[in-house]
Image: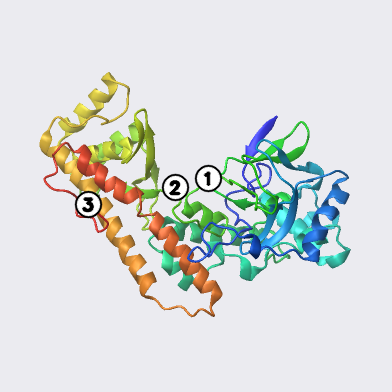
């Protein structure tokens, strides 16, 4: 069976609670998404890696790719002309680093509840202690060092304040707590390698969100392979798509961002105010219709969401807007009587079962529902705009490379949380109200 997987998230090896190893780092303010053959530097270590891996695998891994260094770290380049559809590499499972490759002497230290990624990290740590005597020395020495990692889990508290308006801030705190829990279970080992990619050579491939090439796993042949989605000239960098990820996911899981990310999206949380006279009835109705429920960063336990604002596609083409579930929540929120709620429940039962998916018959309450959403979205625009202005006004020494890079990533993250999703949401609320809103939204970015 052939399945598509994204690099560093192999289905057998990755648990979402552990921090990823960032193979690629982007200083987007200057490097953006372009490569130059002039930036390519081949050293002896790069030249020796592929022959070492092929000898260890006992088979050819690639005849069309070579390892080089670029501004983004280790990269793969076309060593010969490559045509669309060509298989560019095949890495046998035998040279994948997996959690079942434990040295027997460290098995007693592994707690039952430890995730498989942490187990792989322990394997790597044990091999690292062997130094050049390790059979994996060539691979381990190619892994990024701490000062090359920009996953938010490695950011200082001051660094994290740059993204405090983003959901990534809270997710980072949760990641740290999970990692600490895993580390306690792995005593007496003290690991500093973070989440590590585990498919040698393939993990040198850089991410391009527009690429159609994916890392594929063939369980029948027991190999991982990549097929070219287009032609490559000699010396051209070869890239794949890790997945259709927003900058929030890329920064948290991989340690980089990309400019103008077409997959950026906004998370919007909504809640029923506890002082609402119909609080209990509204919560009961929302629960009955299985509206998403979670806990916001402020600890509010009856928060609903997150609702995702992003580009959406319709039969008539591409559009942008507010998800129907979010509109429905706003309509429930606008109800002023038990009869209003009963009417919504009856309408849902008589149609497709979905709650409050049609505009309310009461014009005043429909206007109120739109204005409620408009207020929430505009507030997010203002908060993110203020955070971006703080970043732009801060002065960072060019000698502080780490902070310079991370500030660029924070800016890309916050920009992605505003444009286009939030602006699209504002415009959608205004245009879809059918004239119910008396004026165009006054969002800072419109």
Query: Is residue 197 in sight in this rendering?
Result: no
Q: Is residue 178 shown left or right of residue 397? A: right
Which residue appears at 58% of the width and 45% of the height?
Answer: 241
- Secondary structure, mark 3, is helix
* Secondary-structure class at tag 2: loop
User: Could you tell me residue 291's position as x and y percent?
Assistant: 36, 37
C-beta proximity under 8 Å, tags 1 and 2? yes
Q: Which residue is the site of mark 2?
A: 262
Closest to the observer, 11 or 399: 399
| Distance from the alpha carbon under mark 1 to that under mark 2 | 9 Å
Label 2 or label 3, whichever comes before in sequence order = 2
Q: Tell me the CA gap for discs 2 and 3.
A: 25 Å
Residue linked to disc 3: 375
Image x and y of residue 156, in percent = 51, 71
Q: Tell me what residue is drawn at x 72 percent, y 38 percent.
A: 87
Say whether residue 305 is left or right of residue 81: left
Disc 1 target residue: 210
- Up the image or down, 425 lies above or below 316; here it is below
Callout 1 environment at 10 Å: few (<14), some (14 to 19), or many (20+)? few
> Where 220 sits versus 258, above or below?
above
Kind of element beneath mark 1:
loop
Q: Give the camera-side residue of 237 and 353.
A: 237
| Foreground pick, 70 / 158 | 70
Judge depth for marks 3 and 1 and give the one in front: 1
């Amino acid at each position: 069976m052939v399945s598509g997987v994204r690099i560093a998230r192999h289905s057998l090896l990755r648990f979402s609670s552990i921090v990823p190893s960032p193979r690629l780092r982007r200083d987007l303010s200057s490097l953006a998404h372009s490569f130059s053959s002039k930036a390519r530097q081949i050293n002896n270590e790069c030249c020796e890696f592929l022959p070492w891996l092929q000898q260890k695998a006992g088979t050819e891994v690639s005849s069309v790719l070579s390892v080089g260094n670029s501004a983004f770290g280790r990269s793969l380049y076309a060593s010969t002309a490559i045509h669309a559809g060509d298989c560019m590499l095949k890495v046998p499972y035998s040279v994948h680093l997996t959690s079942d490759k434990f040295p027997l002497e460290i098995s007693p230290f592994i707690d039952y509840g430890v995730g498989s990624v942490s187990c792989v990290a322990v394997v790597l740590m044990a091999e690292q202690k062997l130094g050049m005597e390790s059979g994996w020395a060539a691979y381990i020495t190619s892994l990024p060092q701490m000062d090359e990692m920009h996953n938010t889990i490695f950011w200082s508290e001051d660094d994290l304040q740059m993204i405090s308006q983003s959901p990534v801030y809270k997710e980072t705190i949760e990641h740290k707590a999970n990692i600490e829990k895993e580390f306690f279970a792995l005593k007496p080992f003290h690991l500093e390698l973070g989440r590590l990619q585990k498919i040698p050579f393939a993990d040198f491939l850089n991410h391009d969100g527009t690429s159609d090439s994916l890392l594929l796993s063939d369980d029948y042949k027991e190999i991982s392979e990549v097929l070219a989605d287009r032609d490559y000239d000699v010396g051209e960098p070869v890239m794949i798509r890790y997945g259709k990820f927003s900058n929030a996911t890329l920064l948290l899981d991989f340690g980089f961002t990309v400019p103008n990310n077409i997959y950026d999206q906004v998370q919007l949380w909504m809640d029923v105010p506890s002082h609402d006279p119909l609080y209990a009835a509204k919560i009961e109705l929302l629960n009955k219709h299985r509206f998403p429920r979670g806990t916001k960063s402020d600890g509010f336990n009856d928060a609903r969401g997150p609702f995702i604002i992003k580009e959406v596609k319709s039969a008539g083409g591409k559009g942008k807007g507010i998800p129907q579930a979010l509109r429905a929540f706003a309509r429930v929120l606008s109800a002023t009587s038990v009869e209003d709620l009963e009417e919504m429940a009856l309408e849902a039962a008589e149609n497709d079962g979905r709650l409050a998916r049609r505009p309310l018959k009461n014009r005043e309450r429909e206007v109120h529902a739109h204005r409620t959403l408009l207020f929430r979205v505009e507030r997010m625009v203002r908060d993110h705009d203020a955070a971006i202005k703080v970043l732009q006004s801060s002065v960072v020494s060019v000698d502080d490379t780490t902070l310079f890079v991370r500030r660029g990533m924070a800016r890309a993250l916050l920009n992605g949380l505003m444009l286009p999703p939030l602006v699209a949401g504002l415009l959608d609320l205004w245009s879809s109200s059918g004239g119910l809103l008396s004026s165009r939204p006054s969002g800072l970015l419109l």
